[in-house]
Image (tube, helix red, strand yellow):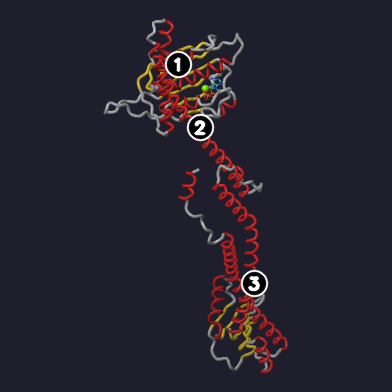
């Protein structure tokens, strides 16, 4: 609890959201729509100008055709000229038909022409540049517009002040701008509402759940309840819920284990004293001349010695000090004999433990630790065989070993029992998880695996195809001696343990 408070204190102040995601999205959407509108505006203003100019030329052509129909020759009379120039808001109107040019009307005020626009050029870039040119400089210019009218060879020419065109273009631009702002605002509001509902709200809900969970991660009630959406957010919610559930469970388990560790350390502490007293008594016992006492006392003393060392190492482990294996060259056959001796006491005599380890095989292990690993495996096998009640069933445990080509040693502990149950297989080598035995703690296999790991070896449950269980330990080859004369640390075998 105290530790939690310290971590809380060390944690930086909660991150303050200074700019909400929704506001940023609102601005971003408006900006995107405006940029799109500008991209649309550029060609459309060019198009608008071209249409406007074409309409002028068409009007000039219509006037020219009607003048020809009236048979009045080239120039119209003054009144007609003034009317035409006024109607087209032009200073000069001329057409070319069937190869002959015809001046229809000309204002006496016309002096200079500043600029010429040919509608023959329909490529997009000149049209766009022309539009911006008009917008920028068209206020005081006199422009000459020439171009084809219709599909035939008729050409028209109009000279006029560019101001009119420019003003029409500015009015058009304003319309587009107002429309753009309206569309951008509407789109932004739509996107804002949609994103708020689809993203921001669920994200806020997840953030809230994370913050709540962080305050008390062991509380399973603070785990988020997924909304059941069938999209990425729904997936994130259910992943978060899974993660929080696992985390809460793990933390509860760890707290439980920490409590248990403390209790074990306390028990061990006192047990060590009791064992020490028992050791003194057994030392005294060994001096008695009784042949039974002489046979069993050394085994008792050995077991008590081991128990004492073990309680000591558990206490050291409780203080989080790694107990590294202290390796020696050990005759495996003898070690298995020791295991068998100790486990033979009080065992059902119908269960046979066979030591088939060749006497020539020695291994590079910590004898006490490896003894414990083997004891756990053989004891498990014996316990599994004890559950077998039929007299006809062969009840046998075989411990065998062979040297591999790479110099390492494979040790197998095989029995003729019922084999491992599903739960035990699922939680194989996991402390406290895999026990199916009444009174079992589920530590034996975890201890064995930990010891084998510490030796750089590998333990696995082998499928032999025969009934029963077979655990196989692969020990790495002995380490070459370093120049100091000490063996170098063994490289671990690939994969510490396997199921
Ligand atoms: N040789 C075996 N045959 C059948 N089942 C086995 C064998 N070895 C282990 N098991 C199964 O694996 C489980 C876990 O074994 P493990 O040694 O880790 O714990 P345990 O024997 O239940 O308790 P303890 O911590 O006292 O050893 C056992 O409960 C048993 O069901
Ligand atoms: Mg066991």
Q: To which residue does mark 1 refer?
A: 339
Q: CA distance from mark 1 to mark 3?
A: 91 Å
- Compared to residue 202, the image places residue 135 above or below, namely below
Give the residue at x 57% y 59%. Answer: 21
Q: Nearer the viewer, residue 223 or 353?
A: 223
Give the residue at x 65% y 60%. Answer: 193
Disc on res. 179: 3
Which mark lies nearer to you, 3 or 2?
A: 2
Q: Quadrant of residue 426?
A: top right
Q: Quadrant of residue 369?
A: top left
Q: Quadrant of residue 420?
A: top right
Total residue callouts = 3
Q: CA distance from mark 3 to mark 2?
A: 73 Å
Does residue 386 appear to the left or right of 401 in the view shown?
right
Does residue 273 appear to the left or right of 443 in the view shown?
left
- Compared to residue 278, the image places residue 187 above or below, namely below
Q: Earlier in the sequence, mark 1 or mark 3?
A: 3
Q: Earlier in the sequence, mark 1 or mark 2?
A: 2
Disc on res. 260: 2
Question: What is the x, y in percent for residue 371?
Answer: 43, 20
Q: Earlier in the sequence, mark 3 or mark 2?
A: 3
- Compared to residue 456, the image places residue 144 above or below, namely below
Question: What is the x, y in percent for residue 150?
Answer: 67, 76
Does residue 83 appear to the left or right of 399 in the view shown?
right
Label 2: state its secondary structure. helix
Q: Nearer the viewer, residue 367 or 412?
A: 367
């Amino acid at each position: 609890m105290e530790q939690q408070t310290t971590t809380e204190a060390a944690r930086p102040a909660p991150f303050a959201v200074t700019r909400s995601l929704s506001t940023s999205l609102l601005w971003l959407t408006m900006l995107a729509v405006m940029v799109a509108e500008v991209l649309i505006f550029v060609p459309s203003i060019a198009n608008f100008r071209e249409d406007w100019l074409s309409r002028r030329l068409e009007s000039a052509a219509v006037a020219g055709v009607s003048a020809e129909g009236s048979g009045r020759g080239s120039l119209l009379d003054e009144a007609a000229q003034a009317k035409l120039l006024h109607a087209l808001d032009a200073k000069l109107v001329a057409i070319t038909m069937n190869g002959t040019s015809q001046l229809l009307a000309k204002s006496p005020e016309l002096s200079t022409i500043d600029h010429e626009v040919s509608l023959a050029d329909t490529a997009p870039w000149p049209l766009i540049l022309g539009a911006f040119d008009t917008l920028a400089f068209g206020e005081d210019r006199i422009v000459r517009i020439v171009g084809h009218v219709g599909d035939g060879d008729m050409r028209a020419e109009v000279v006029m002040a560019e101001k009119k065109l420019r003003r029409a273009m500015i009015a058009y631009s304003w319309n587009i701008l107002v429309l753009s702002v309206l569309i951008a605002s509407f789109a932004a509001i739509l996107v804002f509402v949609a994103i708020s509902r689809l993203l921001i709200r669920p994200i806020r809900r997840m953030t809230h759940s994370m913050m709540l969970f962080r305050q008390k991660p062991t509380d399973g009630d603070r785990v988020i309840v997924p909304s059941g959406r069938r999209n990425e957010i729904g997936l994130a919610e259910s992943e978060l819920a899974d993660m929080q559930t696992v985390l809460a469970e793990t933390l509860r388990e760890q707290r439980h284990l920490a409590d248990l560790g403390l209790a074990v350390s306390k028990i061990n502490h006192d047990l060590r004293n009791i064992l020490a007293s028992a050791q003194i008594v057994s030392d005294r016992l060994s001096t008695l001349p009784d042949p039974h006492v002489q046979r069993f006392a050394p085994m008792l003393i050995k077991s008590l010695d081991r128990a004492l060392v073990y309680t000591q190492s558990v206490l050291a482990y409780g203080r989080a000090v790694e107990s590294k294996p202290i390796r020696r060259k050990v005759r495996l056959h003898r070690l298995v004999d020791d295991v068998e001796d100790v486990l033979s006491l009080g065992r059902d005599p119908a269960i046979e433990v066979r030591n088939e380890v060749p006497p020539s095989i020695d291994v590079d292990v910590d004898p006490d630790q490896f003894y414990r690993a083997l004891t756990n495996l053989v004891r498990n096998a014996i316990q599994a065989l004890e559950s077998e009640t039929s007299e006809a069933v062969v009840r046998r445990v075989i411990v065998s070993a062979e040297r591999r080509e790479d110099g390492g040693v494979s040790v197998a502990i095989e029995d003729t029992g019922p084999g491992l149950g599903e739960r035990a297989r699922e939680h194989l080598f996991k402390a406290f998880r895999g026990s199916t035995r009444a009174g079992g703690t589920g530590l034996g296999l975890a201890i064995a695996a930990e010891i084998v790991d510490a030796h750089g070896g590998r333990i696995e449950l082998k499928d032999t195809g025969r009934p029963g269980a077979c655990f196989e330990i692969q020990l790495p080859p002995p380490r070459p001696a370093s120049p100091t004369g000490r063996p170098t640390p063994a490289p671990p075998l690939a994969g510490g343990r396997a199921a």
